[in-house]
């Protein structure tokens, strides 16, 4: 299988990670994107590399694997690309999850306990210990858990770094090329039709984030990926007063919810540039790009609950993005038996940046016919929890 021609559809962070992994192991890789690299979901997130928001199970296993690989890449990429390439701003800052109500405290402690049972470093803190870590944190803390494994990265730069590394291993990256469909012979993929002509390929990996369902449809398969809108606020620059990624305990519930209506919870962190990022919102409303005042207002109000000093800090801008939502809240990773040669690496919702490296490792192992580091079956497009929406 080594040396086979692979087309990766999507030049976001998942597609970039997949391209790098495959190219480094001997596959001939071409990345296609109808727009610019890192021009979609990867440029609209906060750069979260989290284990703190994931319950024990396959996604947590993938997050742990990805976290290890990101830490390795934080050293490998600068050495490989040289000092002139922009810093990916990897920061192992840790996450601090806090509750401000009695019910929230009970839920947070129970959740952290389950994670510790799965091997996650989740350290319960007293209110005084939390205040020592974050002096500007609200005094209304009823429970706090520190997650030292949480980290952050600059997602757009990280995407470009992975693509640059993939190129060094022989991959090609073509922007402004739309995939129109597959070329099929004897029941399997032998190429793709694009706006720039036909391209031969033995494998096609759909890594188009929230647009993956549309791409899959062009190959004649149904993929239950929907766009879920998120909005982030950015403050003006100031001296660093927030040392960790800090979020309220409601965030985990918002991540796991299947509701289409607007949900907001508070996620607050500083960046290397000196701004503060404030999230997060989730709602399903198609590809409606409007940023609404009501969403901005909710995000700001909840952030001030955690850090009251933010009331005096100007918001410089707001930006949004679409996350690839799957009904059972697990990404779709691996081959599609409905069309041999077609693969998926999508559906990570808001966790794609953090899960990109582990996703790439799974795709690389499966395509090479080797044993993956973690079981791949829970992410299969044929899993029982997706069967009705993929075949119905």
Image (cartoon, grey):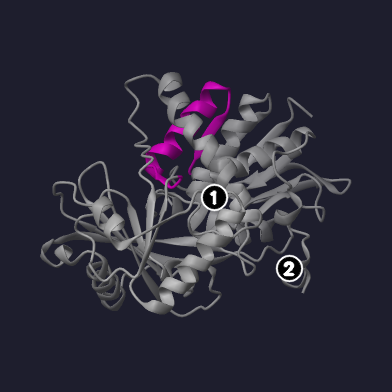
> Which stretch appears magenta?
149-177
Q: Which image quarter holds the N terminus?
A: top right
Residue closer to the observer: 150 or 237: 150
Left or right: 270 as drawn, with respect to 113: left
Q: Give the position of the C terminus as an image quadrant.
A: bottom right
Q: Between 332 and 1, which is closer to the camera in this rendering?
A: 332
Q: Is residue 171 above or below residue 156?
A: above
The residue sitting at the left extreme is 312
Using the rendered view, name the quadrant where residue 124 is placed. Answer: bottom left
x and y percentages locating residue 371 in the rendered image: 77, 36
Q: Which residue position is annotated with label 1?
A: 120
Residue at the (61%, 40%) spot, across then down: 360
Q: Nearer the viewer, residue 124 or 115?
A: 124
The percent coordinates of residue 169 (x first, y second) are 57, 22
Q: Which mark is residue 385?
A: 2
SS at circle 2: helix
Q: Is residue 171 magenta?
A: yes
């Amino acid at each position: 299988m080594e040396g086979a021609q692979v087309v990766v559809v999507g030049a976001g962070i998942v597609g970039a990670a997949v391209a790098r992994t495959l190219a480094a192991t001997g596959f001939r890789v071409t990345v296609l994107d109808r727009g610019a690299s890192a021009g979609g979901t990867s440029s609209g997130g906060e750069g979260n590399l989290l284990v703190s928001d994931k319950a024990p199970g396959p996604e947590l296993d993938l997050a742990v694997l990805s976290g290890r690989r990101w830490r390795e890449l934080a050293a490998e990429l600068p050495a490989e690309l040289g000092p002139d390439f922009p810093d990916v701003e990897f920061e192992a800052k840790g996450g601090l999850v806090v509750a401000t109500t009695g019910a929230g405290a009970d839920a947070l402690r129970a959740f952290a306990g389950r994670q510790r049972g799965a091997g996650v470093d989740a350290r319960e803190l007293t209110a005084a210990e939390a205040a020592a870590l974050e002096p500007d944190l609200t005094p209304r803390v009823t429970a706090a858990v520190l997650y030292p494994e949480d980290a952050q990265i600059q997602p757009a730069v990280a995407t470009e770094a992975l693509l640059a590394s993939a190129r060094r291993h022989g991959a090609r990256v073509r922007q402004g090329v739309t995939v129109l469909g597959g070329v099929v012979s004897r029941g399997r993929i032998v190429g793709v039709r694009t706006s720039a002509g036909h391209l031969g390929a033995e494998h096609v990996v759909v890594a188009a984030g929230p647009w993956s369902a549309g791409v899959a449809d062009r190959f004649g398969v149904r993929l239950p990926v929907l766009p879920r809108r998120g909005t982030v606020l950015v403050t003006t620059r100031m001296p660093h007063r927030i040392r960790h990624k800090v979020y309220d305990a409601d965030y985990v519930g918002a991540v796991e919810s299947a509701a289409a209506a607007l949900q907001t919870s508070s996620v607050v962190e500083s960046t290397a540039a000196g701004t503060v990022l404030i999230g997060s919102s989730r709602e399903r409303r198609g590809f409606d790009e409007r940023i609404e005042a009501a969403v901005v207002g909710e995000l700001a109000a909840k952030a001030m609950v955690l850090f009251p000093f933010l009331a005096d800090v100007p918001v410089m801008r707001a930006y949004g993005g679409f996350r690839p939502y799957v009904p059972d809240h697990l990404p779709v990773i691996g081959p599609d038996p409905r069309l041999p040669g077609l693969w998926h690496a999508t559906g990570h919702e808001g966790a794609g940046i953090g899960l990109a490296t582990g996703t790439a490792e799974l795709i690389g192992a499966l395509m090479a016919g080797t044993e993956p580091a973690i079981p791949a079956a829970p992410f299969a497009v044929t899993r029982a929890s997706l069967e009705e929406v993929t075949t119905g």
